[in-house]
Image (cartoon, rainbow, N blue to C red):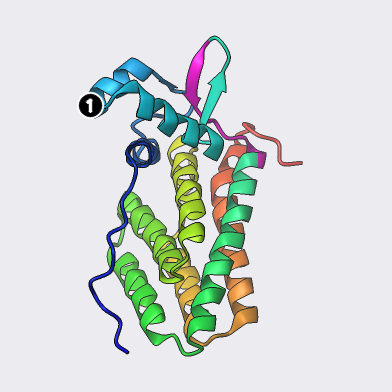
Amino acid sequence: MATSSLEPLKQESTPAIIARKIRTAIGNGEFGPGAQLGEADLAGRLGVSRGPLREAMQRLTQEGLLVSIRNRGLFVAQFSQADITDIYLTRTAVERGAALKIIEVDHTNKPAGAELLGIVAQMEALGGEPEAISRIDISFHEAMVRLADSPRLTRVHATLVTETKMCLAALEQAEYPLEDRVAEHRRIAQAIIDADVPELHKALADHMDSAIAQLLDPLEAAGKIDLR
């Protein structure tokens, strides 16, 4: 029986929509690490009442994107070196699970692999545009999780992507050579196409290790953190 294209619409609650908008704003750098979020200001800017706004902010606090300080209010989280390492460790686990699910659905998953390789080609064509390259980089990982068709992996990954964007915006990242990024992402996509699980594990781990090094090595060299 053919699958119908007329599937039920997924309706989001108002707090979920508000949380998504604030999460996006944090990821885009509109609210930097340590910034205080005022309830009245946000309610006015979003055109919502304080009830659903409070519920949305509570969700973001549970996700770890906001921090509640007693008698002071809510602030955007700030990440330590340990936090950054943990973010990428958790991303590795989530993205590995997504990639394995893609492989399990179809051991010759050409459509998913082709979509991912298409994103890699877009990255390669950008040349020297660091911000655009980072956006395409993130879109590759978002696509990989989306292709797994797992609502829970997608939900968890959305928070991790926001945290990743916060890291990139907050830290003085060294130049991440385009050829390295392209090669690392192409390797992941090819492992999915080949259904090569051991290679997939290694490709993802190597990519995440490389990303962590690009974030933290410049700060260690500048004496801003101690990795020992």
Q: Quadrant of the C terminus?
A: top right
- On screen, residue 227 versus residue 184, left or right, reads right
- On screen, residue 54 versus residue 119, left or right, reads right
Q: Nearer the viewer, residue 214 or 106?
A: 106
Q: Nearer the viewer, residue 226 or 151?
A: 151
Q: Nearer the viewer, residue 208 or 96?
A: 96
Question: Amino acid under label 1?
Answer: Gly
Q: How many marks?
A: 1
The vertical placement of 114 against 17, above or below, is: below
State the SS at label 1: loop
Give the residue pinned by disc 1: 47
Residue 193: x %, y % from top left? 47, 84
Residue 24 found in image quarter: top left
The vertical placement of 195 against 93, above or below, is: below
Q: Residue at x 39, y 41 (%)?
A: 27
Q: Quadrant of the N terminus?
A: bottom left
Residue 117: x %, y % from top left? 37, 76
Q: Residue at x 33, y 49 (%)?
A: 131
Q: Residue at x 44, y 23 (%)?
A: 35
- On screen, residue 61 versus residue 14, left or right, reads right
The vertical placement of 169 against 125, above or below, is: above
The span shown in magenta is 72-82
